Structures are given as structure tokens and as C-alpha cells.
Image (tube, helix red, strand yellow):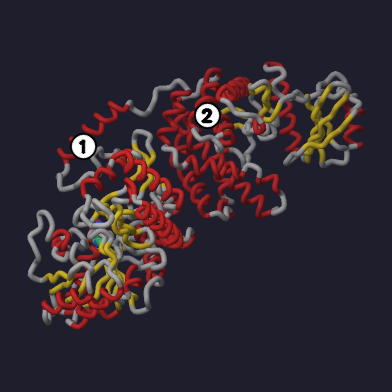
Amino acid sequence: MEQVRNILGEYYGIEANSVMKLPGEVSSNYLIQSGDQYYIFKDTPSDPSAEALIREENAILVQLALSLPGEFPEPVSRQDGFGKRRYHVLNPEGGHLYRLLSYLEGELLAQTKHTKELFMSFGNLLGRMDRELLKLSLPVIEARRYHWDILHFDLAYEHAQMLDDAGIRKLVDHFHLQFHEKVISALPRLRYSLIHSDANDYNVLVREGRVSGIIDFGDTVHSLLINEVAIALSYVLADKQEPLEWAAALIEGYCRILPLEEKEVEILYYLVAARASISLCHSARGRKENPDNDYLGISEMQMRELLRRWIRINPRAAEDAFRRAANLPACIKPEQEARSDVESEVEKRWNLLSKAFSLSYQEPIQMEAAVFQYMYDKNGATYLDLRNNIPHVGHCHPRVVKAGQRAMAKLNTNTRYLYEEILIYSEKLLSYFPPDLNKVFYVNSGSAASDLALRLARTHSGRQKMLVMEHAYHGNTAAVIDVSHYKFAGKGGKGTPPDTLVAPLPGTLNGLREHLNRFGEQPLAGFICEPIVSAGGQIVIEPEYMKELASFARKNGGLVISDEVQLGFGRLGKYFWAFEYSGMEPDIVILGKPIANGHPMAAVVCTAAIAESFHNGMEFFSSFGGNPVSCAIATAVLEVIEEEDLAGNAEETGNYLVRLLTELREEGGALGRHIGKIRGMGLSLGVEIVNDSTGSEPATKLAGKWVNALRQAHILVGTDGPHDNVLKIKPPLCFDRSDADIFISNLRMIAEGIT
Ligand code: PMP
């Protein structure tokens, strides 16, 4: 303190009545009172490059003091300048640089009540400041490469692996990927300027309900002009229920002074998230390096919350709100126009495609993008996804996307060459199986995998006949339709083929035995089944029942095939594979859908003996099966399942959902009285909708009505089962408790409104 007083007296001719230390990250700041004047004294660690930066920072403050007096700290010039204006003092022993700045009155934005008017005035002052900064050119700042600059997200992202919360890390990964997708390519067409670049709510002052000043120019960089707005927004939206409305107020205030360009507004959503991500990367590093310094943790909670909110906002909805605020043309069409767009797209589709393809929902959705458990449509809505089990680890999981991009840019070839991706993946995949299941084939769809499994069983056994489950579905090829009761016995089907025996869906064990006895002795190639019959409406085959079926197959010389296309990879929670629950000990396993998170890949795993029988001179080749890109993607999928403990989440969230549904059923009421059996496990659930929960009469129409009403409420579920009355709940495995709550509360509101 004494030294501060001495410097003030010697260089600035100021006698201090009081000197008070203020909190600060890089520099030590002191509040000085001298008579009725207040000042800020700054003591900054110094080296020659810091001095050059401070010179330019002073130049900015001097310029701002001239054009916008009273709104920014003004450097106090030294008294010993001998006619030359000098502002800072270097400690003769080195290491420190001192400055004196005018003090601005006001409360911190972080500690005042926020209003839209306040945000408007915040934007306004940012705009007035930036209008001045645009005119300046300062070479040292322009040459600065700063790790907080959004342009250099990659510098901060080097620390992303230090984020120890996997749920946050994947959000940061996602926004890093989107930054590369959306921002980098736009850079050459954007405006650059000197910007303050740290208008956080502790650097912004408020007087009488208006933003009255901005302090701390230590982060000034030459960057995208729009980053000024992005940074300000990243600090003030985390606690807002309607973040886009608040953002719009700030943007409107800014644009009244300094209009933003369309190209800038288009990427603003991604820049806000990038800044929050950068902040989180730095806090993670700070905490690892210095666990006791909680100063670094101040904005961490805010930034986490912001990213969790941001991901639920459809980027197009954000762009539309920002465009309107910036007085630019909207990018979402009015409702009527959007509807007629859908109609013409549907019409075009049926001109081009067979109507054998189906579309979901009475009002089909024009999907534009998706991430994790959220899907974004063209009109700005965000859907919570409970029905898509293919994007197993979450839609467009950044780790999976990046693995695919990297591999695709390197080599895409086929299994006739040697490449390590197929070995890395095969080793990893087979480590999840019992030791006897140790050979793998790769194809591109669940259907192709089922088809190959039939060939393997038939070649190995030398027989043709298959035992299949009632209501089962295994794929779309001609041979596989013949083992899919759901298809051959359903609409357009030709009835049971001669080489197919159908086993009944679970009933009593005696009933099953009688049924099987009626077949007598049969020369079987195999028995194919899903341990939970999905198309049947998530019918679980209990171990006892399964044992009976498998032993019938084996007694008749057949192999046992488990179709894990829908159930495998941890969806059932406790059981990584469904066959582990059912105890069926398969000889062949079929894998598909989740294996590569939506990238077309599938596999068949079998014993060495079966693989050996198949090696009979006829080559097996699949042009795409097992290519290095698919293998790299599938490897990333397994890594994410492990890192994010998605099987654990499936178990925990699945149990939670079953508990909520069971409570509802017990409670009765408009919803509960229509809930029949709740089947399945983990995040593979089926909820029967019945006319009355004491009976089991299917309420097909009601189920359909609810599914469509849920779609209108932006929640995606489907129906399954022979009567199409079973709600199918098979979300991406990142689906969590809060999502379950949202689903249940919406379902309840719909049931109470409709029935
Ligand atoms: N088996 C099961 C159990 C399935 O659910 C499906 C697809 N719904 C398939 C096989 C066929 O997979 P794909 O659509 O990839 O050909």
C-alpha cells in the first residue's frame, strides 16, 4: 500500500486518502480516494510485450474518453511527462507496470435486476463502443493470438479433455464441431475489428436501470466484430427462461447503433456456445492446475447451464430471433406457408418414391438437424426423441462424427486390403462376447446380417428349416421375410413359408411344450429370435421360456441365433446383450442399428466352427461391409458407451420411467386407467395402451391419438405391437431423468385434455 501511495505521489501528483485492494485475475487493482475524487490504480505483471499491449490499451481508452466521455475508464496522465503524454509507470526493478484510471460509478450488471430495457441499453453502449473501435488500428493488439478469443477456440479446446463431467464435455465437443462446420468456412466473409471481448457482467456498470459503463480492456483483441455481441450474450443468458427474447433485446440495442450483417447473425448461435465452451475449457484447466483458486470457477456454473439450455434451442429458432432483432428478414416461414411447404414436399416424395415407404405422424416433420436426444425441424422446433434407437449414443454425437470425418478423409476401401481399423474394432467388439463367440463378419444392414446368419446356420447344419417367433421381424430381404412372422403373416404377406415353424409369444410353459410337441421331430437349421420381441410390442421372453425354445432347436440339430439389432450395446442396462438376460447361449449373434450410431453398418458374430464351415470355397464379400470408415465410427460408438456409462444410464433412467408409469397406472385417472402392461427393461420399453387398465383390450385409436398429440408437443414416440397400441420407448441412451419427467408431464396433459 505504501508503495502505491508513493507511486501516486511521485508520478501522478496525487495524495491518496485511502487505498483499497479490489479482486482481480491478472492485475492487482486498488480503489484510490483522493479528496472527493476516486481512481483505480492497476498493478500489472509486466514484460516488454505486456508494456506494448498496455500502451495500445491506453490509446483505446484515450480515444473512447474523447468520443464517449464518462462511459469508459480514462487513463490519468503522469505529471512528469515534460509535455509528452505518458500514462504508465514501469517499476525500475522490473516485473510491474502501474497505471491510474478514472473511476466509474455504478453497480455491476451481475448484481442488478435485469430488464429488457437494461439489455437494450447494454447493446446500445456496446454498439457505440464498437463504432469507435472499428475506426482504430493498433498493430500490437492486432498481432495478438489470445486464448480467450473465440477465433482461437482450438487453443482452449486443447484442454477439453480436462473437463471431468462427460455430460458437459460432450456439449463442448458438439459446439467445437459445429464451430468448425459453421464458423470457420464463413470467416473470409465477416467483418473484423478491435473488440473489447470481455463484456461480462462483472465488467459492465449500471446506473438508473441503464448500462452506463464498460471497464477492463485487458482482453481487447482483433477478432470478428460479432464476437463482441456473442461474448456479452454468453454471460447474461444462463439464468433466463426465454434466453432468445433477452438476447433479442441486446441485439436490437446494438443494431440501432451499429447494424449487424446477415452473415454475422447467421453464426451468432454458434459463437455464443463457442465462448461458453472456451470458458469451460479454461476453468477445467485452471482447476486442475490450481485446485484452490475458486476465482476461476465463478462463471463455470453459468456456462454449464447456458450450454444445457442452448442445446435445447433449435439453431434456426435462434437465428430467426436474432434476425428479427437485427431488423433482417426472418428465416422461419409463417405457419400457413410452412404447412403448405410440407404438403408439397409430401407430394413430391410420392411422385418419386414408392408409397411402401411410410411417413410418421399425421403431420410429417421436416427434420433439419439433431444432436443427442434432441431433433431440430426446419421451423425452429426442438423435439425430444424417445423413439429412435439407431442414434444409440445420441444423434450426431461429435466423437462419432469426428471419427467418421477423419476416417473418410483418409481411406475408404474394402476387406480385400489390410488396414488396422478393422482389427482394432473387431478386437474391441469381440471382447464384449463370451470366448466361444470369436469370429465376426461385416455387412451394411441388419437385414443383410440376418440373411447372412441364415446362410451360416444352413451351411453349418446342412439343413433349411427355421424356428421363428410369432410377431418377430428380422429384416427386409426375401430370405429374411420368410423368417419374419410380423411380415409373412401380416398385411401383404403370403403366409407361413414351408421351411418356417412359428413358436408362440410367451404364454404358459406347458402351452409352449404342447405347441413344440406338435411339430414332432424336425430337421432344423436353427432358431432365430430377439430375446425381447420388439415388433410384438416389447414382449420379453423370460429365461425359462427361452430355455425350452433353445433346447427344442438344439435337440433338432439347429443353431441358436440371437437378433440383437435393437437390443444390444447396453440398451437393456444391466445386460450388454439381450441374450445374457435370456440365457439362450447363442451360436450366432446379429448386430445392426446402434452399432455405428446410424452409419450403415451391421455384423454377425459366431463361433469358429460355424465360420469354418462357411469357408467352403465360395468367397464372402460385401463391398462396404467392414470398411475402415465404418470400423472407425463403430469404435467411437463403443468408446462413448464406455466413457459416458450409457448402459448405467439406460438402467437408471429406464427404472425411473417404469416407476413413474407404474405410479400413474396405480393412480388411475385420465392417463393411468389406460395404461396396461409396462414391458421391457432399460431403455427398451413398451407401454400398452388399453381401454381400461383392469382389462387388456387394446386402445389402438387412443394410442395413435396420443402419439400424434405428443408430436405436436414436440415429443417423439411411436407405436408397436400386433394392435399398434404399445407405446415404443427406445430413446438414444443419453436420455435422462429430466427428459423422462418432460415426457410424462406432457403425456398426462394430453390424456387429460383429450380423453
Ligand atoms: N432385426 C431387427 C430386430 C430389427 O428391428 C430390424 C430393423 N427394424 C432388422 C433386423 C433389420 O435391420 P435393417 O433395417 O438395418 O435392415
User: In terms of depth relative to the viewer, which is nearer, 671 or 522?
Assistant: 671
Name the kind of residue labelled 2 in the image.
Trp
Give coordinates of residue 453: x percent, y percent: 23, 69
Q: Secondary structure at mark 2?
A: helix
Q: Residue at x 33, y 68 (%)?
A: 578
Q: Secondary structure at mark 1?
A: helix
| Quadrant of picture, ligand 1 | bottom left
User: In terms of depth relative to the viewer, which is nearer, 209 or 480?
Assistant: 209
Give coordinates of residue 472: x percent, y percent: 21, 63
Q: Residues within 10 Å of mark 2 (few under 14, many from 20)?
A: many
Q: Quadrant of the N terminus?
A: top right
Q: CA distance from mark 2 to mark 1?
A: 37 Å
Q: Is residue 676 above or below residue 314?
A: below
Q: Is residue 57 above or below residue 461?
A: above
Q: Residue at x 59, y 21 (%)?
A: 121
Give coordinates of residue 216: x percent, y percent: 70, 31
Q: Is 535 displayed left or right of 299 in the figure?
A: left
Name the kind of residue labelled 1 in the image.
Val
Residue at label 2? 246
Residue at label 1? 346
Q: Which mark is residue 744?
A: none
